[in-house]
Image (spheres, rainbow, N blue to C red):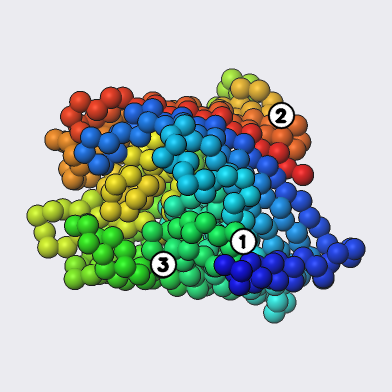
Amino acid sequence: MKKQVRWAVAICAAAMAPGLGATGFDWGGDIRVRFTTLDEIPTEVPGLALDQGFNRDRIRLWADYKPNDDVTLRARLINEFRFYDDDRRQSPDVWDPMTEVLPDELFVDFRNLADGKFGLKIGRQTVKYGTGKIFADGTQNDGSRTDFLDAVKASLTLGQHNIDLLGIYSAAEPELVINDQDRRLNPHDSAAFAIYGKSAQFEQVPFEYYWVYKDEDDSLTNIGSRGDAQFHTFGGRVMPKFGNGFAGSVEFAYQTGDHADEDTEGALLDASFSYSPAIWGSLKPKFSAGYYYLSGDDQSTNKNESWRPVYSYIPQLGEMQGYSYVGSQYGAFGWSNQNSPWLGLDMKPFDKGHLLLRYYNLRADVNDGPGTGKKRGDSFWALLLYKITPNLSGHLWAEYINTGNYYTPGSDDGLFARANFEYKF
């Protein structure tokens, strides 16, 4: 552990120290305070419903050094401490203040190489694309505490077309941890190579496309054993703009590969349509509807057809549905086996506020849960985002699910609620 501390301090100092007192040096941070309650949220474990409350407090400090306009060295240190209402989760005090500090950003970014056509970003970084269905969070086990991947990203820009090539490594227990508490940020080690392209050449029909090869080391299979997985994900997304306030988004992806001794394949379809009419004055409403499909495992075949999450462990259909994956093959927020249409309404109730309302008819693609059917439940949620001052913002989030027959018979309806405050300096 002492060796890890020395390396962490040395690397962070190397990124920060050269700019002390220099015009190219900048620094800052943020403090996040979050209160969450989970009330009878159904899971895929027979008879298990999540019922707990907790407070999460995250502190981040960052420093940038820019020797010129085309190079940035960046480091950010993070600590999060928590207080649970269940002593079993609080013990053995691993979530006390300052028990573990780690860099969640540590990279050098070279821009505008080759006359502005090439860029290179090397190190620990956040990788997000599109709506987050493929790349969004590379550290599944700690929620929103961190979301990084250790990666090399080379970017090529050709007019209105951008292509990123990525080499990625994601460790179960990443290195460079100060006061290590042996927290697993991922359920297994993994590595990936990806190509992600984005084009705005056609102004009314921008599109994206990607290919990802991922290798998982000793990951959980659908029968509870463990084995190595190698699979390819091919996909694309088109975002047509129809004019007069109408817009759409359609993403489709296909997977093929193997896991232990089993062949795998999977499919994703994420389609949505929105309309932003010039009505209701300052409320600026946007009406939306969509359909989200992730294949499930047909247990009558000799392969696993379930969609495998790549690096996408975020609240895609809400926080509550993400928690319901506890006990499944892919774990919490391990999105798979969905067949869910939805409706939405966004508006601005006041000048610096944004209200999102959603209804999801949550269904499974296949019935592999502890219940008798495919209905996960009817989910309703509201999210209010607001800015109090230029430096202080927050949100209030509430979700309710009328639990369906996919879960253990007799399961209560579930509730999720959260208050979040964030101050930046």
Distance (Cα) linking label 1 and label 2: 34 Å
Outermost residue, left side = 300
Residue occupying the point 17% across, 36% down: 371
Sequence-first disc among 2 and 3: 3
Query: Is residue 155 placed above or below 79 in the rendered structure?
Result: below
- In the structure shown, which secondary structural element does the residue marked by tag 2 occupy? loop
The residue under label 3 is which amino acid type? Asp
Q: Is residue 37 visible?
A: yes
Name the residue that disc number 1 marks.
Answer: 178
Q: Secondary structure at mark 3?
A: strand
Q: Looking at the image, tell me whether mark 1 or mark 3 is earlier in sequence order.
A: 1
| Badge number at residue 35 | none
* Disc marking residue 388: 2
Which picture quadrant has residue 5?
Answer: bottom right
Looking at the image, which residue is at 43% across and 41% down?
89
Amino acid, disc 1: Ile
Please provide percent x and percent y for residue 60: 67, 50
Q: Residue at x 31, y 63 (%)?
A: 219
Whole-angstrom CA distance, mark 1 to mark 3, is: 20 Å
Q: Residues within 10 Å of mark 3 (few under 14, many from 20)?
A: some
Judged left or right of residue 406, residue 249 is: right
Provide residue 351's location: percent of width, then percent of height.
69, 26
User: In which quadrant will I find the C terminus?
Assistant: top right
**In the rendered view, would you say 179 is above or below 417?**
below
Residue at left 39%, top 42%?
A: 322
Q: Which residue is mark 3?
A: 189
